[in-house]
Amino acid sequence: MRPALLRLLKRPSAVSVLDSLISTPVGIEHLESRYECLRCSSRKIHQNAVIKEIEPELPARRKPACQPQAPADRSFSFRVHDIDSSPNNATDNKTRTRKSSRTRTTAVAGNLADGLGLQPEKLEFESDVGHTNDFGTRLVDHPLHQYDFALWEELLRYRQRHYGDKGTLDIWEGLSVRVDSVQFPVHGEGADLFWRSFVSVGLKREVFMEELAAHALDIWKQTGKRWDKFYESVVGGYLERGMVQQAVEWHKKLQHPHLAHANDILRILEPAASLPFHRIVNSAVLAKEKRRPDMSPGVRAFQHICQTVEGHQIYGSVISTLLQHGNADDALSMHLFLVERNDHPHTYEDMQPLFEYVKEYEPWYYFKELRKYSKHRFGIQTNPSDLDTMTTKTQPSVNAESWPEEKPFKDEFGARLFATNAFNFEMILAGLKMFGVPAIGPQSLREMAARADGAQDILDKLQMLQKAGIASGNTVFARLIRKLATENREILLSDLLRSDQHPEVLEDASMQESLLVSHYLTRDWRQYNMTLAILAELSEEGPQLFNIHFRKHIAAGEWIFATKVVDQMALQGKTLTKDSVDFMVEHALTPRRRGIGPVTGPGLNPIAEVTFVFRVLQRVVPMGIIVPSEIWVELLKRLGMTNHWDELRECCLWLVRHYSSSANQARVPWTVSSSKDRSRAEKNALSRPRGSRVLDSIFPPWMQGAIVAWGFKMRVSPKLDKVYNHPEVAGENLVIWVRGLVLLREMEKNGLHLSEERIRWSCRLRLATLFSRPRLSSRIQNRMLRRENPYDVRRVINDIVRVWGEPSLFQGEEDTDQYGLVNPRWSASSVQRYQRMLSELANIRRVKYRNRRRVL
C-alpha cells in the first residue's frame, strides 16, 4: 500500500500547479515543460525529448555575466517525494539532483534560445515585440533576459525569415522600447548580424537610418566603441544601389567618428568602382584643351568624398582598383585629381598599370604628360620598352635636329594616284611603303575602291594595305566601305562610291537625317537606303533606328506611322530620346502667339495635334523619359483655350496620378475637406518628394486659376438649363460653370496641392464678369456669356461653396456682402486698362462715323 500511495502523492495536482503559478513571478519562462497540460504535452513530446538530449551538451558561453541563477532551480511550493526507500539510493539521487541543478543553471541561458528554435509557436509569440501591448509577457521583458543578445539574435533571425524588413523593424522597436539604455554589441558575428540587418533596412528608409546613426553615435560617446563596418555598410550600400547623392551626404554625416584614418575611405572604393558606367554629355578639360568622357557616377561620388577628407594617401590602391574594373578613363581622371590634392604615387610601380593603358589606347599627349610627371617625381621618364614602343608608333624621329620634319601625306594627292590609270594598285602600294605613308584618307580610299572589281577585290586590297602597315582610317566612310564589302551589298556600295557627297559630310548626323526625310518624301529609295546605312553607322541606337524613323514620320506628317514606331519601341523596352520628344513638339504643334489660342484654318486641327502629342507622351513617360513641365503646360493651355473640356480633364487627371507621390497608394474617397486638412497639407508642401514638385511646376497657382476660368467658358442657352452632376458632391443639378472647381478637387484627392487664394481670386473675377454692375468687357466671349446668362447669382455662389466645402471659399462674404463679392475693387492697372479700352472703342466708333458720313 505504501509504494502505491507514494506514487499517487507524487503526481502534482491542479492545486499544486496553481500554487506554483501564484508563487512564481510573471513570465512564461518560469514554467517547466512537465507542468504543461496533457494536450500540449502530447503534441510537443518529441520536441521536449530533443531538447533534453542536447541540454547537457550545450556550453554556457551565451550566458550573460550579470545573469543570476536560472529559474530552473527554484524550489516550488509543493514537495515531490522519492518512492525509493533505500538510503544509499536516496543519497545518490540527492547527489545527482545537485549536479543536474548546477548543469542546468550553467546552460540555461544558451539553451533558452536553442530551445525556442525548436518551438515555432512559442518563437512566434516571443519575437512579436514590435509593440507595447501585453508588456511583461515576453521573455525579453524579464530583467534576466533583457540583455541576452543570444536570445535577441534568435528572435531577429526568425522575424527576418518570416516578415523580412518589417520583422527587422519589429526587433528594433522591441529593443528600443522594452530595453532600457540598450547598447548593441560592436564585436563578433552577433554584432555583424544586428548592424547589417538594421543598415539593410535603413538603406530603404531614410528616417530609420537617421535613428540608427544616432544610436551608433550614442554608443561612441558613452563607451568609445563603434562597429567598424558601419561606415562602409552605409555609404557603400548607397553606392551599390546607385544612390550617389545620398552616399556623399551620409559620408559627411558619418565621417566622424566612423573614419579613424583618412585612408579608410578606400573601404567604399570597391562599390564606387563597380557602379555601372553612364556616359554624360558634360566633360572635363584636360591637357592641351582636349576633352575626355565624363567619369562614371560612382567614381565621381568618390571624388566628392575625397574632397571632404584631408591627408589621404591612396593613389596606388585607387589606380589599380579602377584598372581592374576596366575603368581606365576614370583611372586617368583620378590620377589628375589625386595629384592636385598632393596624393602622389610612392613608387614607379604604382603608375606602371596606368602607363601600360595609355601606351595601348590613349593619344600621345596623355603619355607625354605622364612621362613628364614621372620624370619630375621619380627622376625617370618611363619604362624603356614603353618609351620605345610609343616613339615608334607616334613620333617621326628621336633625333629631331638631324632629320627634316616629316610632311603629312595629302589625301588629295593620294586620290590622284589611285585615279591614274597608268599606275596599278601594286605600284601605288610600293610607293606608299617606300615613302613611309602611315595611312590614306577617305578620298584616296574612294578612288581605290572605285577602281576595284567588286566587293571581294576591295577586301583584298584593304588586307594588302593592312599588311603593309598602312591604315585606311576609322571614318564613317571607311567603316561603311569595309562593312558593305564584307556583307557583299554591291548596290549600296556602288551608290556610296558614286555619291557626290564629300566623305566629311557623312560625319554630320543632322545633315544625313535631313537628307533621309527628303529622299523619303520624294520616294528615291536607292538614295534613301544609302542614307539609312550611313545613319546606322553614325547612330548608337543600333540597326533599327527607332528614333530616326520616328522623327522621319513626324517630319513627313505621318502621325499614324509615328505612333506605330512608339508602340514597337514599347514592346522592346525602348523609349524615345529627349531630342525626339523636342522634335515632335516643335513639328506637331502649330506655333501660336502668346495669350492667343491655337491657329485654326484649313488643314489645321489643334485638338488633333494636342491629342497626338499627349498620347505619345503617355506611352514614353512610364519608360523613364523626362518631359519638361513647359510641354505639359502648353498642352493644357491649348485644350483650355479651345474649350475641349473632356480632353483637358483626362490630361489633368493622368498627370496628377502619374506624378503624384501617392500614386501607388490606395485611394481614399473624396470628401469635402476642412480647413485643418488644407493647412496641414500646406505645411507639408516643402517636404514633398520629386513627384509633387513636378506637379507644382505643371499646376502652379496661375494654372489652377486658369482651370477655374476655363470651366466658366461653357456657353449656356437661356432656353436650356445645362446641369453638371458629380457623384462626390452632395446634392444634384450643379451649374455647369463649377466643373473647374470639381476638377481641382479631384486632382487634390490624387495629390495636388491647391492654392486657395488664387482659386478664390479667379472665382471672384468670373463672378464679376457675369454678375457685376454693368461694364464693358473687351472680350466678345465675356459679353456673350453675360448676355446669355440664365443663372441667378445666388445659385452660382451656392454651388461654388457646395463644391469647395467648409469653410467657405469666400470666407463668409457670400452671406455678409454679396454685392462686394461680385464687385471687387479695381486695381490701378485694371482702371488704366479699362480706360485704354474705352478710348480705343471710342476711336473705332469715331472712324466708323466718319466713313459713314463720307459714303453719304
Image (cartoon, rainbow, N blue to C red):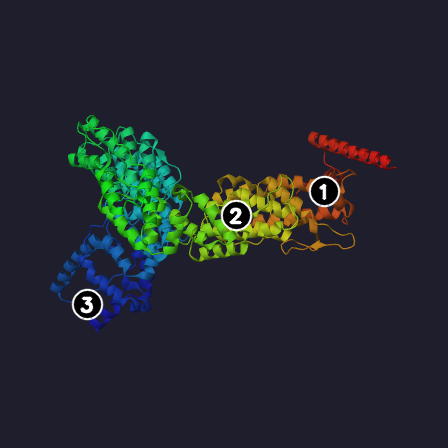
Image location of residue 524, percent across then percent down:
48, 53
Residue 240 shows in the view: no
| Residue extending furthest toward the bottom | 1
Image location of residue 245, percent across then percent down:
38, 39
Mark found first going from the N terminus, 1 or 3: 3
| Residue extending furthest toward the right | 856
Mark found first going from the N terminus, 1 or 2: 2
Image location of residue 682, percent across then percent down:
55, 40
Alpha carbon distance from label 3 to label 2? 98 Å
From the viewer's perspective, is 484 left or right of 771? left
Q: Which residue is mark 2?
A: 584
Q: Quadrant of residue 13?
A: bottom left
Q: Are marks 3 and 2 in contact (CB under 8 Å)?
A: no
Kind of residue sitting beneath label 2: Met
Residue nearest the observer in this picture, 11 or 744: 744
User: Can you tell which of label 1 and label 2 is closer to the viewer?
Assistant: 2
In this rendering, the answer to whether 649 lies above or below 778 is below
In this rendering, the answer to whether 713 lies above or below 290 is below
How packed mark 2 is, by other alpha carbons closer than 10 Å (few <14, some 14-19, many 20 or more), is many
Kind of residue sitting beneath label 3: Ile
Kind of residue sitting beneath label 1: Leu
Q: Which residue is mark 1?
A: 767
The residue depicted at 65 percent of the width and 41 percent of the height is 596
User: Can you tell which of label 3 and label 2 is closer to the viewer?
Assistant: 2
Residue 315 shows in the view: yes
Image location of residue 157, percent across then percent down:
30, 54
Alpha carbon distance from label 1 to label 2? 39 Å
| Residue extending furthest toward the front | 422
